[in-house]
Every structure is written in C-alpha cells, then in structure tokens.
Image (cartoon, rainbow, N blue to C red):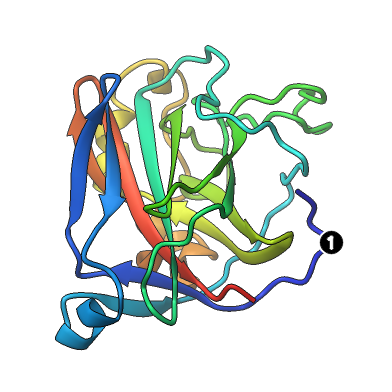
C-alpha cells in the first residue's frame, strides 16, 4: 500500500447495531449484522460523521499482511475488531485493506530512525476485511510517549485508494487500569491524557474503541464508515 494516492475526507462512525460475537481459536471475532438500508430506515443503524485525523510522523508504507503484529513484544493482549462499512448504505465492505500501526508497551515505534528501529516491523500490519467487513489484529495495548495520549493509527485502502486516515483512542480510566501492571509500570507518569491531546480534542471522542475484558487482555472494536471513492 502507498500513501501517495488520493485521500478522501469522509470517515463516518457506525453505531446503533449490535455486533455478534463468535468464538475463534481462543479469541473473539466480531461481525456486523443487521446493517443495510432496512436498518438505516428503521433507525436501528446510524452512521455518524467523524473527522479525519493526521497520519502522524510514523507511517511506513507496504507493511506486512498479517493478523499478529506483536512479534513477541510484551504487553497486555489486545484483539482489535475493525469493521469497514459503506457510509451510504451501512453495508460491510469486503476486501478493504485496513492498515494499522502504534507504539509498543514502551512507547516506541518500529521502522523509525529517531527510535533506532529502522528495519523492524513490530506493531505494524495490514489485514483485508472479510464478507462482514471485519479485519482483526492481535496486538498489545499501546504504550505512551511524550505529548500524545494513547492511540492507534489506522488507514483504510479500497481499490488502491486511501479512503480514510484516522486514529483510534481509549478511555483514560481504562488506560490507567492497564498501566498499573507490567511492563507499563516501568514508565509511570504519562504526561498527556485525552482532554489535553491536541488531536483527540478535534473529534477523538468519536473514534473511541469499544473495549471488553477478555481473559488477561481486552477486545477492542469500532466500525468505520467510508465512501468507496
């Protein structure tokens, strides 16, 4: 995937419809059901406009297509369920490439000169959405770094075009709880919370992951509505 393609400015967040949870290989996978024009007409399904957000300085194109992006790095397990739907109909989009990257538990990004991690690929990966519009990633809860609240970067590509660039966020109360355990305790006193993060303040509340406890870790989910072109 490349970043030089036309970027669209319409991210919508999908809400109101319940997600069915299916067990799979010890993890839980969410699927979007009840979507489509009938759901929109009934009011059971709504698409709410949410802002595009900056790509940030740490994007690396042509990441690996894989589900597990941890490369063995420590941290609280996090399974992400990221669903892509058509903003016009709320129907799931099959075959979209969902591209994510984030800091490890120590607040470090892979593939960056300033981090001395050039050539490394931890916490980066791409997945194609299935028939339910779902892409799943096995990762760990991100660490923090100076000047930013805790977040995950995301791009959605359809047909070779980038149709969404955004960031996903966590509630501060959950981050506080996760950070009471190792390895996060090695870096106490994070300096930026959601309310004081300049990017979160511009619509981040509409990009909060829905989180559920699962064993020793968490499941995080969100449904992103995009225009195909």
Q: Position of residue 28 (x, y in %)?
A: 25, 32
Q: What is the secondary structure assignment of the residue under circle 1?
A: loop
Residue 115, percent across and down?
A: 75, 29
The reply, left or right, for residue 159 in relation to residue 101 is right
Q: In this picture, is 110 found above or below 160?
A: above
- The image shows residue 117, relative to residue 18, as above or below, that is above
Choose top left, top right, bottom left or bottom right for residue 178: top left
Residue 3 rendering spot, x and y as whole percentages: 79, 57
Pointer 1 residue: 4
The image quadrant of residue 111 is: top right
Classify 10 Å Cα crowding around label 1: few (below 14), some (14-19), many (20 and above): few
- Asked whether, in this view, residue 63 is left or right of residue 146, the answer is right
- Which residue shows up at 58% across the image and 66% down it? 53
Side (left or right) of 87 relative to 175: right
Q: Residue at x 21, y 77 (%)?
A: 39
Q: Which picture quadrant has residue 165?
A: bottom right
Quick one: quadrant of the C terminus? bottom right
In terms of depth relative to the viewer, which is nearer, 181 or 223? Answer: 223
Q: Position of residue 116 (x, y in %)?
A: 79, 23
Q: How many marks?
A: 1
Residue 146 position (above or below residue 196): above
User: Residue placed farthest to the bottom in the image?
Assistant: 41
Given residues 21 and 69, the one toward you in this image is: 21
Residue at left offset 56%, top offset 61%: 166
Determine the residue located farthest toward the top in the rendered image.
72
| Horizontal side of residue 94 vs 54, given as left or right | left
């Amino acid at each position: 995937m490349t970043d030089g393609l036309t970027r669209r400015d319409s991210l919508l967040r999908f809400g109101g419809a319940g997600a069915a949870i299916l067990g799979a290989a010890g993890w839980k996978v969410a699927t979007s059901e009840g979507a489509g024009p009938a759901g929109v007409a009934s009011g059971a399904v709504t698409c709410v406009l949410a802002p595009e957000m900056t790509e940030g300085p740490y994007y690396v194109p042509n990441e690996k297509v894989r589900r597990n992006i941890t490369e063995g790095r420590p941290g609280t397990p996090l399974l992400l369920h990221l669903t892509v739907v058509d903003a016009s109909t709320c129907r799931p989009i099959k075959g979209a490439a969902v591209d994510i990257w984030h800091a490890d538990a120590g607040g470090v990004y892979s593939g960056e000169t300033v981090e001395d991690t050039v050539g490394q690929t931890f916490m980066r990966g791409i997945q194609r959405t299935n028939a339910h519009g779902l892409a799943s990633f096995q990762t760990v809860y991100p660490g923090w770094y100076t000047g930013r609240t805790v977040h995950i970067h995301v791009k959605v590509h359809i047909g070779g075009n980038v149709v969404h660039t955004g960031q996903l966020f966590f509630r501060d109360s959950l981050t506080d709880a996760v950070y009471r355990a190792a390895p996060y305790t090695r870096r106490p006193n994070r300096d930026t919370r959601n309310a004081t993060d300049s990017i979160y303040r511009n619509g981040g509340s509409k990009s909060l992951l829905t989180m559920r406890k699962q064993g020793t870790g968490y499941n995080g989910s969100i449904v992103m509505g995009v225009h195909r072109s």
